[in-house]
Amino acid sequence: MNAWCVVNTLAHQEARAELNLLRQGFRAWFPVMMRTRRHARKLETIRAPVFPGYLFVELDPDREPWSKINHSFGVRRLLTRESKPQALPDGFVATLREALDHDGSWAIAAAAVVPGQAVRITSGPFAEQIAHVIELAPNDRVRVLLDILGRGVMATVPRSAMIPTTLGCGPRS
């Protein structure tokens, strides 16, 4: 029975590992997203890994010679449990693939936010917290002010990890 498993790659070698696994006949998938970065005083849009250092491979661990994955260029190791490839939950990769954009990249809708606006953090260590946008930071990140234990705490979070809200929009002191 085929299952999607996770391959840990060498640093910045995800595309190389995917290419080598495809050449060996494995069904591999390296999800990417479009990201804007500043380089040499220019803004450029690049394809960046959704999961840096990881990609997915579909295989039948009982019938395929999966151990050769660990010896492929760009691969650090196939994640295993009790000396067998560890399978992802059913539907995990299918759900990720449904979020693909027309160009094959993962579409993450980033919230349009402005300084002073209240937002709700949707993921990460500050999930479900209400914060106020302080400033927009490079690489689609936003500096926010959170109220934690009665103190203002500054944090930088991905723009895709927040949604605008009207909660907690009272005047700030």
Image: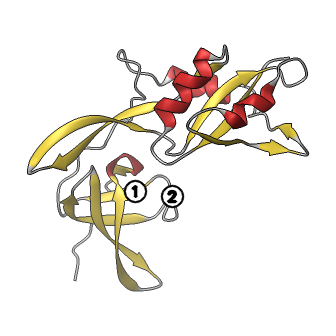
Q: Nearer the viewer, residue 141 or 48?
A: 48
Q: Quadrant of the C terminus?
A: bottom left
- Tell me the distance, in whole angstroms, between the alpha carbons under discs 2 and 1: 12 Å
Q: Amino acid at mark 1?
A: Arg
Vertical order, 165 against 107 (above or below): below
Q: Residue at x 55, y 27 (%)?
A: 18
Q: Position of residue 32 (x, y in %)?
A: 43, 32
Q: Residue at x 50, y 53 (%)?
A: 123
Q: Position of residue 92 (x, y in %)?
A: 66, 30
SS for dot 2 = loop
Q: Amino acid at mark 2?
A: Gly
Q: Which residue is mark 2?
A: 124
Asked whether the viewer can see residue 44, the reply is yes
Q: Position of residue 103 (x, y in %)?
A: 35, 17
Choose top left, top right, bottom left or bottom right for residue 172: bottom left
Q: Nearer the viewer, residue 47 or 141?
A: 47
Q: Position of residue 26 (x, y in %)?
A: 67, 18
Query: Outermost residue, left direction?
Result: 41
Q: Which residue is mark 1?
A: 120
Q: Residue at x 51, y 42 (%)?
A: 51
Choose top left, top right, bottom left or bottom right for residue 120: bottom left
Asked whether the viewer can see residue 29, the reply is no
Left or right: 90, with 124 as reference point: right
